């Protein structure tokens, strides 16, 4: 929730303005009955119904951070659960990221390498994202923004080595555009004709990956392979891509070899 920068609605679903006592909520019309049962609010009056596309661009205030965001439209919104209004955090999910890019949203990821909130979320700085959940619920309840909280079971990635739960977090990386200069096709042909594979059948798996993958992420967060020939300014962190530097690194690597640990 601290990384929220939008709320997604499906453009073609019907959304209603539903009044419950002195509050008015916006949710998918087909989910009103289910939400009523889950929250215990049984006196709901439907004031108006519109298509999601009519609500695009409406701005709202974050429940506990000093910023405003807006309602967006997305085809991935469904009626399977929730309210039909989907939290969007471009820094923490692939679909959210792509939606954020289409709307020029910042890629906000206020979580560090240890899975703790950064100074961008001042009151939770240094707190594990998992430990922060009950604190956020408590804050929402205190300020009158919490309608209901519960547990939703769904599939989520875990580390294949230790079984720890993982999160999606956008970080700066180096990518190769495989569609420039016909690289995708040239690489695919090289796999078949110029590389010796052991075992031989593995070449088709790599060929398939090349043909289907999006931009290729070259960088890693560990010592591995051949280093990327780019240096960074110690003052501002700007990447310096210079032909002379690249040539010198290339010559040094040819002479000394590549030891990623150095």
Image (spheres, rainbow, N blue to C red):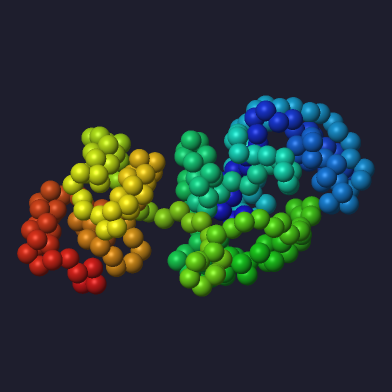
Residue extending farthest to the right is 43
Quadrant in which the N terminus is drawn:
bottom right
Residue 123 lies, in percent from the top left, at: 60, 65
Residue nearest the observer in this picture, 56 or 175: 175
Residue nearest the observer in this picture, 27 or 104: 27
Residue 230 lies, in percent from the top left, at: 21, 55
Q: Number of labelled discs?
A: 0
Residue 232 lies, in percent from the top left, at: 24, 58
Instruction: State whether residue 250 appears in this view.
Output: yes
Residue nearest the observer in this picture, 46 or 34: 34
Decide if residue 183 is on the left or right side of residue 210. Answer: left
Q: Residue drawn at (84%, 52%), measured in percent from left and top?
A: 39
- Residue 177 position (above or below residue 146): above
Q: Residue drawn at (50%, 36%), measured in percent from left and top?
A: 103
Residue nearest the observer in this picture, 46 or 151: 151
- Residue 85 position (above or below residue 51): below
Residue extending farthest to the front is 200
Decide if residue 86 is on the left or right side of residue 194. Answer: right
Instruction: State whether residue 124 appears in this view.
Output: no
Q: Residue drawn at (76%, 57%), measured in percent from left and top?
A: 149
Quadrant in which the C terminus is drawn:
bottom left
Residue 148 lies, in percent from the top left, at: 79, 55
Decide if residue 259 is on the left or right side of residue 6. Answer: left
Q: Residue drawn at (28%, 65%), measured in percent from left and top?
A: 224
């Amino acid at each position: 929730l601290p990384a929220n920068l939008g709320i997604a609605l499906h453009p073609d679903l019907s959304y209603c303005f539903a009044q419950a006592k002195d509050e008015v909520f916006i949710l998918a019309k087909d989910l009103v009955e289910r939400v009523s049962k889950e929250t215990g609010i049984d006196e709901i009056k439907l004031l108006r119904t519109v298509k999601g596309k009519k609500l695009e661009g409406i701005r709202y205030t974050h429940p506990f951070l000093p910023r405003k965001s807006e309602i967006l439209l997305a085809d991935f919104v469904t009626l399977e659960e929730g309210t039909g209004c989907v939290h969007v955090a471009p820094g923490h999910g692939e679909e959210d990221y792509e939606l954020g890019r289409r709307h020029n949203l910042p890629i906000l990821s206020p979580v560090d390498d240890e899975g703790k909130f950064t100074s961008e979320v001042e009151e939770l700085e240094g707190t594990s994202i998992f430990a922060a959940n009950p604190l956020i619920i408590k804050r929402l309840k205190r300020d009158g923004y919490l309608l209901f909280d519960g547990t939703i079971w769904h599939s989520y990635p875990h580390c294949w080595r230790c079984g720890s739960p993982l999160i999606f977090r956008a970080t700066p990386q180096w990518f190769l555009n495989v569609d420039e200069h016909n690289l995708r096709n040239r690489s695919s042909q090289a796999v078949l004709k110029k590389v010796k594979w052991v075992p031989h059948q593995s070449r088709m798996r790599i060929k398939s990956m090349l043909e289907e993958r999006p931009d290729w992420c070259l960088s890693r967060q560990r010592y591995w392979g051949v280093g990327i020939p780019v240096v960074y300014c110690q003052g501002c962190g700007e990447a310096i891509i210079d032909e002379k530097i690249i040539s010198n690194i290339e010559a040094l690597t040819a002479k000394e070899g590549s030891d990623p640990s150095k």
